[in-house]
Image (cartoon, rainbow, N blue to C red):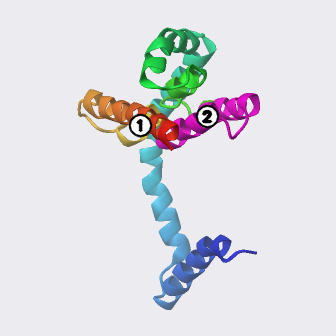
């Protein structure tokens, strides 16, 4: 067994040992924390459910495929292989959907191909922007358009720069 796999269990044991030495009632603290988490869960759940449903509808309706096909000439101009256009489009919506697309790209084009390496960069440099936004901004009463647009531009810039660097090196 590798030492790295023991870090989290050791951390839990240390926390429990320190709590016992300080005579902290662990179960009472745990149940207090759970009580505080329930209202948070109730406030976040509708946003998460809506985001997951919209991500699935975006994929199932074929809209993502149509948009990806429309953006293919633009992607080609920026040096992004058109074969990964669906991945670039799905990544901000769905982590599991983008993982499935990445796996499909690897099996179709081979893991060492330029297309697969660009896909890996697109997958690794991006984030599920809308999912994260739903979680972090669920209770916020602020305008969310600016942070979401900045995140999407950063995701896309990472893909463009990554594919460019893969061409160079």
Task: Give the residue pinned by disc 1.
Answer: 161
The secondary structure type at the circle numbered 1 is helix
**Magenta-drawn stretch contains 15:** no
Q: Is residue 124 visible?
A: yes
Q: Which residues are magenta?
A: 98-127
Task: Give the residue pinned by disc 2.
Answer: 114
In the depicted structure, whether residue 35 falls above or below residue 156: below
48 vs 92, nearest the viewer: 92
In the depicted structure, whether residue 24 falls above or below residue 143: below
Q: CA distance from mark 1 to mark 2?
A: 14 Å
* Residue at the image position 47 percent from the left and 44 percent from the top: 41
Residue 15 location (% of width, % of height) = 52, 79
Residue 39 location (% of width, % of height) = 42, 46
* Magenta-drawn stretch, dominant element (helix, strand or loop): helix
* Residue at the image position 45 percent from the left and 35 percent from the top: 164
* Residue at the image position 51 percent from the left and 71 percent from the top: 28
Tell me which label, 1 or 2, sits earlier in the chain: 2
The quarter in which the N terminus is drawn is bottom right
Question: Where, by quadrant of the figure, is residue 154 drawn?
Answer: top left
Report crowding for label 2: few under 14, some 14 to 19, many 20 or more residues within 10 A (C-alpha). Answer: some
């Amino acid at each position: 067994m590798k030492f790295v796999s023991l870090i989290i269990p050791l951390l839990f044991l240390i926390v429990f040992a320190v709590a016992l030495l300080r005579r902290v009632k662990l179960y009472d603290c745990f149940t207090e924390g759970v009580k505080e988490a329930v209202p948070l869960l109730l406030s976040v759940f509708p946003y998460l459910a809506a985001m997951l449903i919209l991500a699935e509808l975006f994929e199932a309706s074929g809209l993502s495929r149509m948009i990806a096909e429309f953006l293919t000439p633009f992607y080609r101009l920026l040096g992004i292989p058109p074969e990964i256009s669906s991945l670039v489009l799905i990544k901000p919506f769905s982590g599991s959907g983008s993982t499935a697309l990445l796996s499909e790209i690897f099996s179709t084009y081979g893991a060492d191909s330029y297309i697969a390496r660009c896909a890996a960069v697109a997958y690794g440099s991006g984030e599920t922007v809308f999912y994260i936004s739903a979680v972090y901004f669920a209770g916020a009463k602020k305008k969310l358009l600016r942070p979401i647009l900045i995140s999407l531009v950063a995701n896309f810039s990472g893909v463009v720069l990554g594919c460019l660097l893969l061409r160079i090196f």
